[in-house]
Image (cartoon, helix red, strand yellow):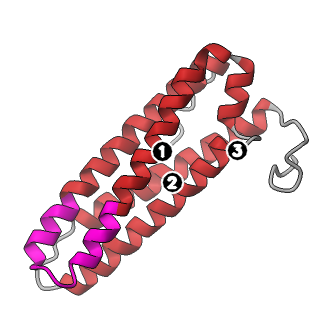
Amino acid sequence: MMNPAISPEVPLSPSYVLDAAVSRRGELHSSANHLAQMLSASHLGREDLWLRESNHALRLLRQDIEEHISTTESAAGIHHEIISLEPRLASTVARLTTDHEVLLDRTATMAVLFITALTTPMDICVAALRDEGKVVVDLLTRHRQRGADLVYEAYAFDIGGRD
């Protein structure tokens, strides 16, 4: 199939857009789980390693979120296609776009917390990072569910069980 980055003016079939959504969905699920695992690991006696591993997991999740946004919101992305096929779903797409902004803001907050950890007592930073990480993972879980519901409503195609 044609890569939209190479030729965005070529209309894409719904199967390509859906395949891309399913693939991105799996990546987001995996990186969110990885962040949750890193943040829940014990930090006692290994604070520097915990910070490095957790920060790395956050960067991977942030990258996956940015790629997800880039592909879903592009002219060749699923949001554009859904609005073209089902204009009545534009407000649902707008809600998902708002979710993207919130996810970017919350992951940016976590990045600042990692920097703060260099000069703040570790227990305070660990608690704040774990709390914010739980919020990010919960937001992403709800976002993924709303996205699956949108895809089902637009295409009558269930992407919910493919993680």
Give the residue number, with chain letter if any, for mark 2.
Answer: 65
Q: CA distance from mark 1 to mark 3?
A: 13 Å
Point out the tag, 1 or 2, that comes first from the N-terminus.
2
Q: Are marks 1 and 2 in contact (CB under 8 Å)?
A: yes
Give the residue number, with chain letter if any, for mark 1.
Answer: 100
Point out the tag, 1 or 3, that comes first from the N-terminus.
3
Check residue 9 in the rendering and tell me which mark sits there, or answer none: none
Q: Secondary structure at mark 1?
A: helix
Number of dots carrying numbers: 3
In this rendering, position of residue 81 left or right of residue 138 = right
Q: CA distance from mark 1 to mark 2?
A: 8 Å
Q: Give amino acid for label 1.
A: His
- Tell me the magenta residue range: 109-130
Q: Secondary structure at mark 3?
A: loop
Label 2: how many residues lie within 10 Å, few (<14), some (14-19) or many (20+)?
A: many
Point out the tag, 2 or 3, that comes first from the N-terminus.
2
Magenta stretch contains residue 50: no
Given residues 14 and 121, the one toward you in this image is: 121
Q: Which quadrant of the figure has residue 77? A: top right
Above or below, comparing residue 34 to residue 89 in the picture: below
